[in-house]
Image: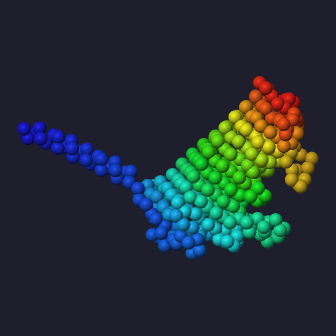
Amino acid sequence: MTSKLITPFIIFLFSSILNLFIKSSNASTTYNVLSFGAKPNGQIDATQSFLNAWRAACTSVEPSTIYVPKGRYLIKEATFRGPCKSKITVKIDGTLVAPLDYWGIGNSGYWILFIEVNGISVIGGSIDAKGDGFWACRKSGNNNCPVGARSITFNWANDVVVSGLLSINSQVTHLVINSCNNVMVKNVKVIAPDQSPNTDGIHVQSSTNVTIIGCRIKTGDDCISIGPGTRNLWMEKILCGPGHGVSIGSLGREYEEDGVQNVTLSYSIFTGSDNGLRIKSWARPSTSFVKNINYRNIVMKYVDNPIIIDQNYCPNNKDCPQQTSGVKINDVIYKNIEGTSTTEVAMNFDCSPSNPCQGIQIQDIKLTYMNKKAKSFCNNIQGTKKGVIWPATCI
């Protein structure tokens, strides 16, 4: 009789201990920036309060959340450095604002920097870099302007999530993903005037397994720019415009340079952008390359250059006259792309004479020039066509 009572008790005790262990292993601590002295009035410097909250979260042995309540928080240059002991979520319900004086962040190159962090999520909220003053300095021809700050940057980080963030008026690039692995950028919005210089929306380089989905980007430069060393990049449901389109490159600036491969862009809309799908390289020798690129199910609405490969990039004819691009472009697919071009040449393939584009596939293209027939241009390109092609291809 006693043993019959003891056995269920042991099972119950073991189960309770196991549940307690599971709960403790999934425990999460929240660090509210207000508890560290931050004031949500947009006037008192909250930088140190945010850094102190980060230090507490980074040293926590259990997953933690840094919470930013509603309000405006003045943040100067801030580096959130790892490695940390566990995963961290930065949950933002408020707005982070840069100093009104653009020198406050402009000479650092970075405004908000996450470096060497694994398992970092930035959820919701807004960041306003107040870039107007910096752009005015640049446009004035003043040689004494700062270099400009990227709004939010991830360097050497793994397992990154950025979701629901709104980035406004960055001095230069809004979001940078550099030397990272396993990154999800979802439902992010980027807003800057169409004449704001170098305000790329999202820049990816030297990174693998990056997904960008459901993002709305209005800016003065590339909506998404893709730099050397990018591999396995998936982009889907992107709304781009105004801006300079989705650009691979410029590549080949340096002779010894990594390439770009395995990139997909699908189910996206370009509206009033300077370019749509662009691959660009410097006209000089390089070891760089572009291969396995897939563009499909794209709509162009009054785009200047819907499809363009430019391997003769040589701004101001400096450091590249009389040279040709060494960047090898192979296996690029354009499928089910339709809409309107604002220039007569809707498909422009200007490839390198020393390294012709190869394996270019075009299928089911319907592009018109202001509701009239458009044209295509081909130079040093080899490829195939299939289905209905407007304009008539020169491949």
The outermost residue toward the left is: 1
Up-down relation of residue 130 to residue 83 (above or below): below
Give the percent coordinates (x, y) of residue 389: 81, 28
Residue drawn at (76%, 59%), measured in percent from left and top? Answer: 196
In the picture, which quadrant includes the N terminus?
top left
Report if residue 391 is visible in the image: yes
Please state which of residues 336 and 5 is positioned toward the viewer in this rendering. 336
Residue drawn at (76%, 28%), measured in percent from left and top? Answer: 364
Quarter of the view holding residue 295:
top right
Give the percent coordinates (x, y) of residue 265: 68, 39
Give the percent coordinates (x, y) of residue 272: 77, 47
The outermost residue toward the front is: 371
In the picture, which quadrant includes the C terminus?
top right
Quarter of the view holding residue 356:
top right
Residue drawn at (64%, 68%), measured in percent from left and top? Answer: 98
Residue drawn at (67%, 37%), measured in percent from left and top? Answer: 266
In the displayed structure, does residue 207 sit left or right of residue 54?
A: right
Please state which of residues 208 and 103 is positioned toward the viewer in this rendering. 103
Report if residue 309 is visible in the image: no
Please state which of residues 18 and 122 is positioned toward the viewer in this rendering. 122
Query: What colour-coding does the image apply?
Result: rainbow
In the displayed structure, does residue 358 sit left or right of residue 206?
A: right
> How many numbered marks have been drawn onto this rendered protein structure?
0
Give the percent coordinates (x, y) of residue 307: 79, 39
Please state which of residues 218 and 393 is positioned toward the viewer in this rendering. 218
In the displayed structure, does residue 382 sit left or right of residue 63?
A: right
Up-down relation of residue 369 to residue 321 (above or below): above
